[in-house]
């Protein structure tokens, strides 16, 4: 009898790549940008999916009703995993994928697997641009998901959803070898907290630097930004929204040549660095309060009167509390 396989992966591009490689089984794209917006603890999958759908809709990235239906259908298909002999996790090494993998492994850690096997294919190569032969060759790296991996994922997912970042930082002092790309994901998440001197996240700092160097058109700017990432994870919509955030308010760090909605990308949009932006880049001013306006990183809700900073050079977390 033919083995029934459920292939869970990060999104539609990966699904298309698996199809082109004629991988057997049914695809399930996870389709959530978990490094953007609230991922609070204390919610089951259905409740969290509702929170995620509302956030994505509020950003203008999709309409709420269809998105709620899509999440519900996705979750229902996941709950039907016992219809399959094997669940294959096809994921990459970057932050976007690693957070999705944590969510899924945490969910499976709480399930009775019955006769279904879980296997993992996770490498440092991106699925979307991979050739069919390269994807087929990945099968040689397939491994069974171990109980220790499920336990680590459960601990890490809970830490990511805590209302303060201390537990997420504490993971760096534990053994993470069961999930070899997790440490990089933790560190990259922490780099999205404001820097103690500039108040900028790593992404915001790179964006400002590139504009200051003359890379002022969105399409070119986004391409150059991607080269600054060891493990690219951010999509163009998230980056476009960040640039709009940097251009808002009395102390805007960027100028925009023409105002467009933050969810409708104008590839020819042009940017400039304000005097305040140059002060921040020079370390003579901080943008921490501006970038911490109603911002979420996992379960942590950053506000101007309550936010944390992260110094990647010294692995130091500092907190500000109202």
Image (cartoon, rainbow, N blue to C red):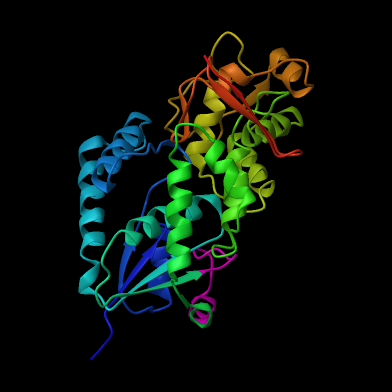
Question: Residue placed farthest to the bottom in the image?
Answer: 1
Front in this rendered view, residue 171 or 241:
171
Quarter that holds the N terminus: bottom left
Residue 3 seen by the camera? yes
Q: Decide which of 78, 160 is in the foreground and name it.
A: 160
Dividing the picture into quarters, in which one does residue 17 lie? bottom left
State the extent of the magenta-drawn residues as a range.
Answer: 122-137
Left or right of 172, for residue 111: left
Residue 130, placed above or below residue 60: below
In reply to whether residue 21 is colored magenta, the answer given is no
- What x and y, as percent, mark residue 321? 54, 18
Q: Position of residue 285 (x, y in %)?
A: 73, 15
Task: Give the residue furthest to the top.
Answer: 250
Identity of the residue drawn at 45% across and 56% down: 153
Q: How many numbered tags mark residues here?
A: 0
In the figure, is residue 71 to the left or right of 302?
left
126 falls in the magenta region = yes
Residue 118: x and y in percent read 37, 72
Task: Pinpoint residue 230: horizontal percent, then vertical percent.
Answer: 67, 52
Residue 292 falls left or right of residue 84: right
Residue 255 can be seen in this image: no
């Amino acid at each position: 009898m033919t083995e029934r396989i459920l292939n869970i992966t990060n999104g539609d591009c990966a699904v298309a790549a698996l199809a082109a490689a004629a991988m057997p089984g049914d695809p399930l794209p996870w389709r959530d940008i978990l490094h953007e917006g609230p991922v609070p603890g204390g919610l089951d999958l259905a409740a969290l999916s509702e929170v995620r759908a509302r956030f994505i809709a509020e950003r203008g990235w999709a309409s709420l009703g269809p998105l709620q239906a899509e999440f519900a259908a996705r979750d229902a298909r996941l709950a039907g995993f016992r219809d399959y002999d094997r669940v294959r996790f096809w994921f990459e090494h970057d932050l976007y994928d690693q957070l999705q993998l944590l969510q899924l492994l945490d969910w499976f850690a709480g399930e009775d697997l019955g006769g279904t096997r879980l296997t993992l294919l996770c490498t440092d190569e991106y699925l979307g641009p991979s050739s069919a032969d390269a994807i087929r060759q990945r099968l040689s790296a397939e491994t069974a998901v171990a109980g220790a991996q499920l336990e680590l994922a459960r601990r890490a997912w809970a830490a990511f959803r805590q209302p303060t970042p201390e537990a997420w930082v504490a993971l760096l002092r534990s053994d993470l070898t069961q999930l070899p790309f997790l440490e990089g994901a933790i560190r990259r998440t922490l780099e999205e907290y404001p820097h103690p001197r500039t108040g900028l996240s790593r992404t915001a700092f790179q964006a400002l630097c590139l504009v200051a160097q003359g890379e002022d058109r969105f399409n070119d700017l986004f391409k150059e930004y991607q080269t600054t990432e060891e493990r690219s994870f951010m999509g163009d919509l998230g980056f476009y929204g960040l640039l709009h955030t940097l251009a808002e308010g009395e102390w805007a760090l960027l100028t925009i040549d023409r105002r467009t909605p933050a969810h409708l990308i104008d590839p020819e949009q042009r940017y400039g660095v304000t005097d305040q932006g140059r002060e921040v880049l020079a370390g003579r001013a901080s943008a921490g309060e501006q970038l911490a306006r109603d911002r979420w990183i996992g379960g942590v809700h950053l506000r101007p009167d309550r936010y944390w900073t992260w110094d990647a050079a010294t692995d130091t977390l500092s907190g500000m509390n109202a």
